[in-house]
Amino acid sequence: MKNANQEKDFSEWISYIQEELRKKKLISEKMDFILDESLRLFDASTGSISLTDPDQQLLTIVAAKGMDGEKKLAAKFPFSVGITGMSAAKKEIIYCPDVTIDPNYVKLIDSVQSELAIPLIAQGETIGVLNIESDKKNHFNQIAINRSQVFANQLTFVLLEERIAKDAVSIHKESAEPLEALIGYDAQILFLKSRIRNIASTETSVLILGEEGTGKHLVALSLHRLSSRKKFPFETVDCSALSSDLLEVELFGAGEVGTENRILKGKLEKANHGTLFLDSIGDLPKELQKRLLKVLKNGKLIQGKSLTNLNIRIISGTSRDLINDIEKEAFDLDLYYRLAEIPLRLPPLRERRGDIPLLAHYFILEFNRVYGKSKTISPDAIKVLSNYSWPGNVRQLRNLIQYSIIVNAQTEISPNHFQGEILGKSESTNFPSKESIDLGSSDSPNQATANNMNLDMLSPTDNLSLKIATERLEAMWIREAFQRANTQEEAAKLLGISRGALQYKIRNNQFLVDFFSGTA
């Protein structure tokens, strides 16, 4: 802390703050001003103020400095998640002198090296957390830490006296965005949210690509709610759930139904002026593909003697390889181009393992509310969840948490409350085990494959390109990092790179691509 700030009396600071706050009209301006003054007082480079939603144990960032806008919109911490959540849950100051070696740290700002989380307590309850951060390790000394408690008491007084905290939370809830349901801080998720915002207002068709359980319906609904069609219907058809005859009626409707010869509207007509989400579009029968293409080309739906002019946006979702289906003539090429003007890929949960603890705590909050429980989850249980491959993705994780909340009689969820499948298949994401890189062991095909990969990488080939040699060595180092770490975030820290950089290398280093896809 600067000497001038050390000498500044907090009572004078409070008076100054309150006087300045009365000059500012907007709550956002008030919160930004308080944060700026707090950072100046503690000689911090970045930071944030998170306030507690009184309806749930969830922290929402209402002011931030140095944080990417997309992260600020996405950042919500359940109690116990990250240094911020831990401070809120324990109701105590938590100082992390070196965030690069702290497994609890959730990285939102690349430059942060040390962090001080200060809970704001009123009547024994956490109303928020002030985070002050530095781009230097070990930045905050004991004097600053001791003074931060007194500071927090004074800041809490200001927030309550001026009713700023309550108003800030209320405003945030009123302006809650449709993308809040897409939970995560992983670079792929943040990019996806940004892409959704960019294309939502257009009239282009969108094809959402992703494995089962990744959240294709949520993305489609978000696109609709952010579009100019949001006041009109959003309809969904699951093309894999019905027989061909029923699916035809579901989509296109039917004429002369019953003795009254009434018209039965299909989802195309029901979604007129709005959005129709065709889930599992790859399962749409070939004859219905042709009919759908004709309707979309003409913009008209004819059912019996009825003709409807359609003004509709089509969003589709699939977990299938439609290009492969087109090559096999199982999917219509023209329909594909009609539906896939913009493709969106949803990453599987195993590609964003750093989000697993966050998602788990969110689902615990959700089902605690639903079932009137107050369950928590142990660090060991979080570690087990982070190591599992999640073939069913976010949906499977949500179902597991629901199961654990319902059947567990204890207040804390531990690993022995999970099904044997979860416990028996950790690290099953094609990341080799530590034993598999032991050159003296060949107890299994996977181990033999890993052994051969290591030997091949260490041996020169006909091509002596240094670029290739560097990629080969880089691949070995990255594989080793995954043996020592539980998450991508931890592996990236061991390698001294960002998680985004690690994900880029995994996708673009051919030795890693081949190995993780099982072709090596």
Image: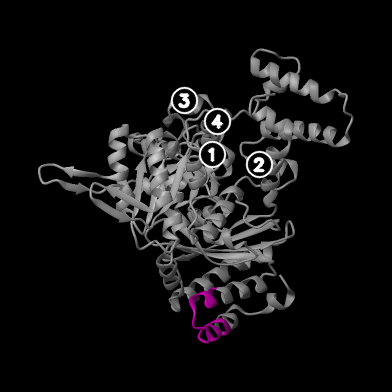
Tell me the amino acid under the disc marked 1. Answer: Pro
Q: Position of residue 424 (x, y in %)?
A: 51, 24
Mark nearest the camera among 1 and 4 is 4
Q: Nearer the viewer, residue 402 or 504?
A: 504
> Where's residue 467, x and y in %?
85, 37
- Upstream in sequence: badge 2 or badge 1: 1
Q: How would you classify the magenta stretch by its main secondary structure?
A: helix
Please tell me whether mark 3 or mark 1 is closer to you in this view: 1
Say whether residue 188 is visible: yes
* Amino acid found under the numbered disc labelled 3: Glu
Mark 3 or mark 1: name the one nearer the start of the chain.
Answer: 1
Q: Which residues are magenta?
A: 16-31
Disc 3 target residue: 421
Question: Residue 160, percent across and down?
Answer: 44, 74
Q: Label 2 sits on what residue type?
A: Glu
How far apart are the two marked residues, 2 and 1, measured between alpha carbons?
19 Å
Q: CA distance from mark 3 to mark 1?
A: 19 Å
Label of residue 327 in the image: 4
Which residue was labeled with disc 1? 348
Q: Position of 505 compared to 235: left or right?
A: right
Residue for badge 2: 490
